[in-house]
Image: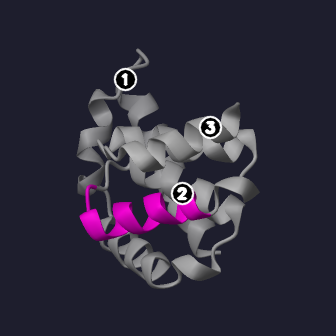
Amino acid sequence: QLAQSLWSCGRMVDQATSFCNDDDDDEGEDHWMNLSFEKSVMSISQELTSRVGEMTPKDLAQATWAIGKLRLNNARVVCAFAYKAKDMTSKLNAIEVTNCMWGLCKVNFNDREVATALCERLL
């Protein structure tokens, strides 16, 4: 449920930015913190970090996509999700892998081992 809640926050940002921007750029996403759920996003992401060992592949993909959409650059959260994705690679399907990769790229996560593991899963 927590991963879906975080994903929902990301979708709300999508909706809010679509009202502000007619084009398909990410310019409006930087202003998500002005929305009322900023504290909730931080609380949810930190709670998910403490439960990362319990996350399913779907949970991990949704949460990692959400941190990318929300540009949540909290190193503890990002690293927890990234290294869990690396450890769980064999259980991730192609959509889950690409959602994880997209989210990690959006927060400028740069770890060759994680990227290699995820890319190899797609081959």
Residue on which disc 1 sits: 21
The one of 72 and 80 positioned closer to us in this rendering: 80
Q: Position of residue 40 (x, y in %)?
A: 38, 73
The dot on residue 123 is none
The one of 69 and 104 positioned closer to us in this rendering: 104
Which quarter of the figure has residue 56?
A: bottom right
Q: Position of residue 14 (x, y in %)?
A: 48, 39
Disc 2 to disc 3, C-alpha distance: 11 Å
Would you call the spot at circle 2 few (<14 residues within 10 Å), some (14-19), or many (20 or more)?
some
- Tell me the kind of residue under disc 2: Lys
Q: Residue at x 61, y 54 (%)?
A: 61
Q: Residue at x 54, y 57 (%)?
A: 86
Q: Position of residue 112 (x, y in %)?
A: 38, 42
Residue on which disc 2 sits: 86
Q: Is residue 85 magenta?
A: yes
Dot 1 falls on a residue whose secondary structure is: loop
Q: Mark 1 or mark 3, which is nearer the start of the sequence?
A: 1
Which quarter of the figure has residue 82?
A: bottom left
Task: Using the image, determine if residue 95 lies above or below residue 18.
Answer: below
Query: In the rendered view, does 114 fall on the left or right side of 20?
Result: right
Would you call the spot at circle 1 few (<14 residues within 10 Å), some (14-19), or many (20 or more)?
few
The dot on residue 120 is 3
- Tell me the kind of residue under disc 1: Asn
Dot 2 falls on a residue whose secondary structure is: helix
Residue 113 seen in the figure? yes
- Tell me the kind of residue under disc 3: Glu
- Is there CB contact under 8 Å for labels 3 and 1? no
Q: Quadrant of the C terminus?
A: top right
Task: Using the image, determine if residue 59 lies above or below residue 54.
Answer: above
Depth-wise, is mark 3 or mark 1 nearer the camera? 3
Q: Residue at x 46, y 63 (%)?
A: 83
